[in-house]
Image (cartoon, rainbow, N blue to C red):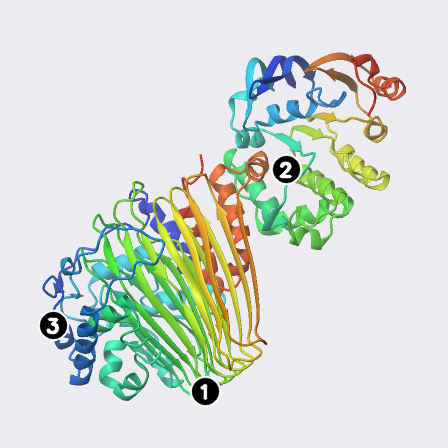
Amino acid sequence: MLEIKNLHARIGDNEILKGLDLTIPLGEVHAIMGPNGSGKSTLSYVLSGKPDYEVTEGSATFDGQDILALAPEERAAAGVFLAFQYPIEIPGVANMTFLRAAMNAQRKTRGEEEISTPDFLKLVRAKAPDLGITQDMLRRGVNVGFSGGEKKRNEILQMALLQPRLCILDETDSGLDIDALKVVAQGVNALRSPDRAMLVITHYQRLLDHIVPDVVHVMHKGRIVRSGGAELALELEESGYAAYGQNAA
Amino acid sequence: MPAVQETVERVRALDVDQYKYGFVTDIESEKAPKGLSEDTIRYISAKKNEPEWMLDWRLQAYRRWLTMPEPTWARVSYPKIDFQDYYYYSAPKAAPKSIDEINPEILKTYEKLGIPLRERDALLGIESSGGSRVAVDAVFDSVSVATTFKAELAKAGVIFMPISEAIREHPDLVKAYLGSVVPVSDNFYATLNSAVFSDGSFVYIPKGVRCPMELSTYFRINERNTGQFERTLIIADEGAYVSYLEGCTAPQRDENQLHAAVVELVAMKDAEIKYSTVQNWYPGDKDGKGGIYNFVTKRGDCRGDNSKISWTQVETGSAITWKYPSCILRGDNSQGEFYSIAISNGYQQVDSGTKMIHLGKNTSSRIISKGIAAGHSENTYRGLVSAHRKATGARNFTNCDSLLIGDRCGAHTVPYMEAKNASAQFEHEATTSKISEDQLFYCLQRGLSQEEAVALIVNGFVRDVLQQLPMEFAVEAQKLIAVSLEGSVG
């Protein structure tokens, strides 16, 4: 279970999270919606430990463990995964090499054996085709020359291989056409499980047609201002974020 | 697991301060008196039982050297070297006649480095590494201790031996080629080397012979304050092919050690020489104290038509590096290549690059240089591409990338180009980038540690060059890159 209490965080002098409370039990998918600048992406960075974001107050625990006290790579090994809004390119490092390095690094931190080459290949072959990841994409440099959709699918492949316990998806739908959106949503839905919590950050309702959340939260000015069922997303689609001082973009 | 793959791990386990190869072998050694004079040179020559002509050659070089100023154009700074404060010759006492007579202490040192000195070990290495074989001519300080696979190479007609032996056994070959690529008076350090060179490798591949195995030499500098002046001469006769690997490690030292090597390559008509180096000498401690001064002259002469010379280097060590492996493209249609990874960390200073001198028609050259600077280091690429007025159709492609890690290091690119005929085509690409915070965080978020992330990103950056190395060497080089960048972030 993810439990965030009264979380305040800032970047430089700019306070962005201003007392955020959020609880996501294992097995549930929660969506956070909100206007631009409400602090959605900041929340994902603070939870995953991006440098430059400073937590000034409050707490965030996952299964009782204080994740804010951990280094970013320790959080990853503890099961925190962030699907990036803008996945990063690493030229010259084959996608396969990166996937395997990540997997083994996490295993090492948890005190587990490295995965054998045949096991690793088997795993990749089992997961990649469903996400439309070709051999060529596995051989190319990480995200180098990938289209927007390919990058997002590659994020979901990493998630499928690393089997995290807390998945944070930051605007995974941005830049996707409807077909790509479906593939990504299928990949995410396949990972829904009773011992996994998911936080889906999005600006638009359409992603939530495909990944149906258990709870929808509305974020505004660094706090959760409203929570409800999946129908809340539909309502927001109708009325926009006008009630929160901004028109739907 | 092949010995080369274990090299880094084994030595790493020793964990001596920052430098992983810092250990000293305790053996008795025999030295020339400190300092440099005609007497020193006579001493060296006598120790080697050299013929008169060799001594004359050395003395001529020495007299020339006395008139030469020390070059100051490189982008490196260091306290003035007192050339009288070095020993110019150091050899283990009583040179061994066979491998069994080798001092076990020396064998142990090589074992720590994972070098398959004993043929048996080398053979074991073969089985596990999938068929490639390496002959090792081990240079311990100044004397080649043992040469393996000699007999098998002899069967193919290949001559691979310490140059001191070649001077005695193949004087005509040595006379014909020594100094023919790097003349005695070429530059300050090459001239010094010509006067006092102690040993090195000699390779001759006869006409039409493809050398049956990779040739390899490991150098270690062991004796306190010993300049190592190694001299290598490789000749590939018409239609011959050879791949030569050079690997270097040295024990940790407080005093700066002087190293001025000369390597000459000659490729006759249709011949090809591949020369690969992994250089990992002591770079100095974390405050910039100590470390090797490395002033090297490496040059290949594509003497015949359709010949090819390829330099590949991975430079991770030394406090000062001054090194420009070059190609003279004399024969028509000859090709020169230079692939380089130069990594500097701590207070290391690297000024390295290449010269491609196009003299023949339709000659082509290719330069791929990857410089990585971390810590407080300075990393300079200096390159010359020139086409003679008769070198019609000369082509060059240069790609020169620099990567910065942190904000206290420097990367510099100094390309010179001279085209004296209108048909020459030169292309130059250069980039300078930093490892971005975003790349690092992306890796960390996936579970990699800071150091693993940097090593991964850097290995990606240098991939084009790593691919040029023989496979076993590439594995070792990849690990060395990780080791030499330890502590460069955060």
| Kind of residue at disc 2 | Leu
Q: Are marks 1 and 2 in contact (CB under 8 Å)?
A: no
Dot 3 falls on which chain? B
Instruction: Give coordinates of residue B327: x percent, y percent.
Output: 44, 73
Q: Quadrant of residue A158?
A: top right
Disc 3 to disc 1, C-alpha distance: 39 Å
Q: What element carries label 2?
A: helix
Q: What residue sits 45% from the left and 87% below the top?
A: B238
Residue that numbered label 3 is attached to: B38
Q: Is mark 3 on a helix, strand or loop?
A: helix
Residue that numbered label 1 is attached to: B238
Residue sticking out furthest to the right: A238
Disc 1 to disc 2, C-alpha distance: 56 Å
Tag 1 and tag 2 share a subunit: no
Disc 3 to disc 2, C-alpha distance: 69 Å
Residue A162: image tag: 2
| Kind of residue at disc 1 | Glu
For the C terminus of chain A, the quadrant is: top right
Q: What residue sits 28% from the left and 88% below the top?
A: B172
Q: Given this view, does label 1 or label 2 mark the residue nearer the observer?
A: 1
Q: What residue sits 64% from the left and 31% below the top?
A: A81
- Going by the image, does B269 lie left or right of B188? right
Q: Nearer the viewer, residue A165 or B273?
A: B273
Tag 3 and tag 1 share a subunit: yes
